[in-house]
Image (cartoon, grey):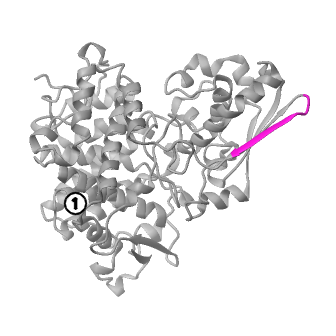
Amino acid sequence: MIRHEVRVHPETARLARGEQLAWKLAVAACDDVTLDADVVQMVENRVIDNAAVAAAALNRAPVVIAREQAMAHPRSHGSTVVGLPAARRVSPEWAAWANGVAVRELDFHDTFLAADYSHPGDSIPPILSVCQAMGLNGSDMVRGVVAAYEVHVALVKGICLHEHKIDHVAHLGPAVAAGIGAALRLPIETTYQAIQHSLHVNTATRQSRKGAISSWKAFAPAHAGKLAIEAIDRSMRGEGSPSPIYEGEDGVIARLLSGADSAYTVVLPAPGEPKRLIMETYTKAHSAEYQAQALIDLVCRLRSQILERTEGDWDRVQSILLRTSHHTHHVIGTGAEDPQKFDPDASRETLDHSIMYILAVALQDGVWHHEWSYDSARAHRADTVRLWRKVSTVEDERWTHRYHSIDPDIKAFGGEIIVTLVDGTEIRDEIAVADAHPLGARPFQRLDYLRKFDELATEYTETSERRRFLQLAQRLPSLSAEELQTLSLTASASRLATRHSKGIFSAVEY
């Protein structure tokens, strides 16, 4: 691996392309190395995982709207839209839009946390869409996905966006551009220009995940993927982009991040080295913000002890304190100082980012469900509201240190929970990582991905359709171009909702 120092350079220095981070990202992405077997298998796992969570979200309003917008852009040799028959094709950037929203809507797919946050699986919909539209095969797609993960994880490790309240899709855009460049085997120059373009147009503020969180949380990564496809198209036509996008006097580091005197270190594989960073990412067993995953597991474990001492009377709980990392406390805890995080009328997206709500409901129910746990009636239950408002969080330096550690045996995304009863009894326990994490009690394996797929996709798809999809997904690298055209999940027509919402784009009937 090579450690690349990234800092601002004056325009008079005329920083050579070979010294720019965007160029180095393109070089790493385009290096056509042999892929390790476990890496390829993990790509298959994440394709299955994405399909599962997308299927479960098919009838949610944002997904229906994105699908209807995509349907207004038909293209005979385009890309598939999850839920629709494979024969119904749309322009690839709009397929990426619709599929990206479906994948992200439930906050239920893979994650990587380091200096910043990320959902690397968000790169799969736009890469698949381009591969289908351009007649590529499964091996091409796998190469692109692996490259996207490599770039994405490297950026998340090296550059913190959250510190400056820049939304984490600023790393996703360049990763998607890099992945598409690798899939298409584009020249380094072309991929480099697309990476710069994609970063330039994907630097939004983090207000999308603050306060009253809206459905844009699901649309944001889809938008990044859509813009990355457009960046690739423009670059393939020979057009340049703002350069150097990271290191320029008015570039991202100077104006949006730590400023002209700062420096970052991004670690990328040397030429010929294998791309393996996808193996450091992890998926979710629960439909909630990743920093809640381990804590859901913990309160479900504590539940029996609390029930035994309270006899099921939740009013006998005096307080619940979570000692955790800076990020968890300030993003989804009381450190965020968002009153919406205690509001029963808050959006699903807001409740997903309220560890106080999540702990109260998971403790009472002993389980976390992607629909029931967010139901309005569930959020308004009187004893839940009372318990919810007894939950607070504090930052604990020990957990902050573990969160930022680069040692996988120390790195943690959990905390300590202290439940105090009205009689003064304290029940406490702690957890470092979620049970499904690679270092957790029950790390996700292929069978877990298949189980998750069956649980989530059953409501809207037929058994034969699920089997067909899994047969393709589990031999992804060997799929022909014709087979890759059918790598999508078709819903039962009678179960697929429509809204016929009015906008500028109107669906075109075939």
Q: Is residue 163 above or below residue 225?
A: below
**How many numbered markers are drawn?**
1
Report the front residue among 38 and 3: 38
Q: Left or right: 295 with respect to 268? A: right
The quadrant in which residue 470 appears is: top left
Residue 320 appears in the picture as rendered: yes
Residue 71, given in percent of the width and then of the height, sits at 20, 29
Look at the image and tell me in which quarter the N terminus lies: bottom left
Q: How crowded is mark 1: few (under 14 residues within 10 Å), some or many (20 or more)?
A: many
Dominant secondary-structure state across the stretch colored magenta: strand
Report the front residue among 194 and 443: 443
Q: In this view, does 224 lie above or below 449?
A: below
Residue 417 appears in the picture as rendered: no
Question: Residue at point 43% right, 45% down?
Answer: 110
The quadrant in which residue 393 appears is: top right
Q: Is residue 426 magenta-colored?
A: yes
Farthest-out residue, right: 423
Residue 83, given in percent of the width and then of the height, sits at 26, 26
Look at the image and tell me in which quarter the C terminus lies: top left
Q: Give the range drawn in magenta.
A: 423-430
Q: Left or right: 251 with respect to 81? A: right
Farthest-out residue, top: 494
Residue pointed to by mark 1: 182
Q: Is residue 133 magenta-colored?
A: no
Regarding mark 1 in the picture, which secondary structure is present there?
helix
The amino acid pointed to by label 1 is Ala
Report the front residue among 344 and 33: 33
Residue 85, given in percent of the width and then of the height, sits at 18, 25
Q: Left or right: 185 with respect to 197? A: left
Report the front residue among 309 and 486: 309
Residue 84, given in percent of the width and then of the height, sits at 22, 26
